[in-house]
Amino acid sequence: MSRHPLTRFAAKAFRLFEHLYVEIPYRLSRDKRWSFPPTHLFVSPTLRCNIRCEFCFEIEDIEDKAYVDDELTLEQWNEVIDRIPPRTLITFIGGELFMRKDAFELFARSAAKHRITICTNGTMISPEILDRLWTLVPKRPWKAGLLEIGYSLQGGEAVHDDIVRIKGSYQRTVRGLGYLQEAKKKYGNKMLPFTTLRTTMQPKNMNDLVHMYDLAKRFEVDTLDLQVLQDARTVREGWEHFDDAAELTSYEEEMDFDRFREILEDLTTRSDGPMVSFTPADIPVEEVVKIYKRTADLTQYRCVFPWTQHAIHPDGGLSPCLQAVFPDSNIKGTTIGKANQSDLFRNFRHQIATHGLYPTCMGCCGSRYIGPKHKATERSTVAVRHERPEPTEAPTP
Ligand SMILES: C[S@@+](CC[C@H](N)C(=O)[O-])C[C@H]1O[C@@H](n2cnc3c(N)ncnc32)[C@H](O)[C@@H]1O
Ligand code: SF4
Ligand code: SF4
């Protein structure tokens, strides 16, 4: 078995804590506006990327060069990091983090005071980078430091290179996985850092998911995380436009749903390799299939993001939602605690709790499956469009 025996226990403990952290203010606050300060921040220091995944919810911004000019400098990031309450969990995402030459310096500053995790496509990882990252790994998961390194890969070689639209990408990520395995051995195969292989589930890679499990097992990765594909191309226009994005892509013609269910059931019952998890967390297999069939009942899901997590964009933009941008909200002029209790954040919590999830939220990692026991919300109905939107063009490598 490749995973560390405490991986599952740590994941469960984390979920239980998160559940209570959301549930207490949710129940106590009648208008659902109040919450504790966030414990988990998703920080994107850059939206530059060296590959062009056709499904990526950031793809339009990755193409938008304006974001590069607006990126906070290392100095500005350091100021932001220093003002975040100690021991906050910071997940660094992007963009591809290592497109920033100063990525390590930013991680080091953050890991001195906070618990951090990094999410990378792995193509730029070298043994030297890993040696430096290992200097940030703490002895215990509740201590400040680097807790997790996660790589994203979308299938076997042909499928991955097709989806990310740059030839040779699969080989580069797999090389990075090899370096990660060597580093773990070199530093004594300790529980930390947790290692994760992430893959979205989509028609093109459905038959490659078993290969992903085998790959994670071969490289002794702790967790294979299967991510529900979020059809989130239009929400960047602002959350007032969530309802305009009500039409979701249909997978009916491209996916054999029974076969999909079989594959997921097989993978989630295996015990000889990595732990298999889903994003959104703890979602049952049947619900995953329903999301792809577009028959999932949105009233059986709750958004937890603004109660426990916030997002910080490359220009310092601060958001209570993983998908929507709020042009007037920026960390530069405030603190996390103040922003969390601002009208914008309070109203967003009220709105999402009373309205319920929007179709575009389906599959978002900020949502949780709560099952049929719920109070009715307004929620919008799901419409499905049958042709897939054209992906944006791949750049010349
Ligand atoms: C936006 S990427 C940024 C970090 C890094 N470049 C990477 O790919 O890991 C963070 C994660 O979001 C996932 N992701 C991107 N677009 C998605 C979508 N439309 N639905 C679900 N997950 C998505 C990727 O698979 C990746 O694991
Ligand atoms: S590597 Fe990550 S940020 Fe880059 S396009 Fe793919 S999913 Fe998006
Ligand atoms: S589930 Fe929550 S965080 Fe995710 S897109 Fe919907 S409102 Fe935003």
Image (spheres, rainbow, N blue to C red):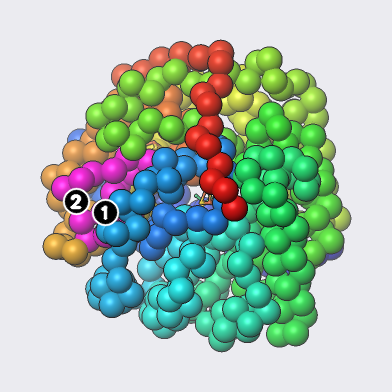
- Dot 1 or dot 2: first in sequence order is 1
Q: Is there any visible trace of residue 358 in the rendered image? A: yes
Location of residue 289 in the rendering, given as x and y in whole percent from the top left corner? 65, 26
Q: What residue range appears in magenta?
A: 312-331
318 displayed left or right of 180: left
Location of residue 391 in the rendering, given as x and y in whole percent from the top left corner? 53, 32
326 displayed left or right of 102: left
Is 189 colored magenta in this rendering? Answer: no
Q: Label 1 belongs to which residue?
A: 318
Q: Is residue 22 above or below residue 363?
A: below
Is 317 colored magenta in this rendering? Answer: yes
Q: Is residue 106 above or below residue 367?
A: below
- Identify the residue shown where x is 72% and y is 36%: 205
- Identify the residue shown where x is 29% and y is 34%: 237
Find residue 87 and report its image quarter.
bottom left
Location of residue 353 in the rendering, given as x and y in whole percent from the top left corner? 30, 33
Q: Could you say which disc has been placed on residue 8 in the image? A: none
Q: Could you say which disc has been placed on residue 329 in the image? A: 2
Task: Looking at the picture, tell me which residue is in the foreground, 240 or 222.
Answer: 240
Task: Looking at the picture, tell me which residue is in the foreground, 63 or 4.
Answer: 63
Q: CA distance from mark 1 to mark 2?
A: 5 Å
Q: Amino acid at mark 2?
A: Ser
The dominant secondary structure in magenta is: loop
Task: Say if mark 1 contacts mark 2, CB within 8 Å.
Answer: yes
- Identify the residue shown where x is 61% and y is 25%: 292
* The CB of the residue at mark 2 lies under 8 Å from ligand 3: no
Task: Looking at the picture, tell me which residue is in the foreground, 397 or 384.
Answer: 397
Q: Amino acid at mark 1?
A: Leu
